[in-house]
Amino acid sequence: MEELFDSYKAFTKINKVIKDKNINKALNRIASYTKHIVSLDIEFYSYMSLNLKYHANYERLDQEKIRTVSFPKEIAGLWFYKDDKYWYLKGTFHFNVVPPHLLSSLMNFRKMRITHSKYSTVSNETSKKMKNLENKIFKDDKFMLRFTNPRELKFKKREQLLKASHKLFIYNTGKYRNTLKKIFDLYRNDILVKKRNISKDSLYKIISIILGKRNTIITKEDGDIKVMENYLQLINETNRRRYPKIDKSINHFDIKIFNGYFMEKYGSAALENEFNSVLTMQTFKKKISKFYKDELKKLITTAHNPLTDSVWALVVALTMILKCN
């Protein structure tokens, strides 16, 4: 772990000892037998693929069932470790991976899903340019009818367009094919993305340390774990001797176990809504609030910035594990 914070600019050292008894108690319960906790979140690249070696999702497109495979695009989070007595916040990280189609012909660029501005952490200038290109597509009602429910489009247009955007792949967007390519190029050439880029060798090392060691990983659901496994599989297939397979050794603390509670009491199990609900709880106010205000609040920017989402997941985990006391 230490070598990651010493070697990569995408890893930021904090090295803050945590002496608060409640935070240490919560981290102990979350960690179980492990000495490292990583709260992380990932934004994805997705491709249509029939390759059965990868974790996949099945969706409907043009009345047919399609298979989509996802890989990390941006990975961000917080890293904690424990000495004999206290937990430490080692630091934070946020890095970008090499797009899968640039690593291997197994993933076809034409079959890649739109690089959506909503799920991309970029400079304001790049974000505006990406949104302007997206709007050219989304404002073309005639074109978008193929991907939306026409009976609901008039009444739920914003919601329908967001759903429809996930059905846009480079190969199936006709006159807007080059627009999707331009959006991808804008993202890849953004100044923040370039600063966060990590090479294939470094990515293999980093993800191997995250997944292949006895770490506790905090996420919401298991999608983030699966896409990291997909990326290791892809790298392995480029050179099996240089990049041997990694056996997963993590303890996974999945906050989806609290989904039922949030749905029943607050009406939503969406991560941001869970986080906002937690802020109203007495357990948070009495036991977590100071640590959150001192160390975590300053890391939050916008939803779907993976560092923000990893903080939200951590706060939910800390609060709920103490609330269950």
Image (cartoon, grey):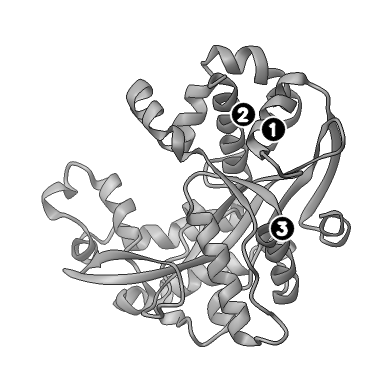
Q: Which of marks 1 and 3 is nearer the N terminus?
A: 1
Q: Earlier in the sequence, mark 2 or mark 3?
A: 3
Residue extending furthest front? Answer: 33
Q: In which quarter of the image is the C terminus?
A: top right
Which disc is residue 213 wearing?
Answer: 3
Q: Which image quarter holds the N terminus?
A: bottom right
Give the residue type at disc 3.
Lys
Residue marked by disc 2: 318
Q: Which residue lies furthest to the left in this view?
A: 151
Q: Distance of mark 2 from mark 1, alpha carbons?
A: 7 Å
State the SS at label 2.
helix
Query: Which numbered mark, 2 or 1, is in the foreground of this view?
Result: 1
In this rendering, which labeled residue sits more in front, label 2 or label 3? Answer: 3
For marks 2 and 1 on the same chain, the one whose residue lies earlier in the sequence: 1
- Side of 168 where 242 appears, left or right: right
Query: Residue 201 or 144: which is nearer the viewer?
Result: 201
Q: Where is residue 245 in the image (x, y as percent from the top left)?
A: 64, 76
Image quarter for residue 262? top left
Residue visible at 33% across and 24% down in the picture? 264
**Residue 53 location (% of width, % of height):** 46, 77
Query: CA separation, marks 2 and 3?
Result: 22 Å
Label 3 neighbour load within 10 Å: few <14, some 14-19, many 20+: some
Place of residue 59 in the rendered image (x, y in percent of width and height, measured from the top left): 28, 64
Q: Which disc number belongs to residue 27?
A: 1
> For the residue marked with disc 2, what is the amino acid?
Leu
Question: How far separated are the C-alphas under marks 1 and 3?
Answer: 18 Å
**x and y percentages locating residue 152 in the rendered image:** 15, 47
Callout 3: helix, strand or loop? Answer: loop
| Left or right position of 52 against 216 | left
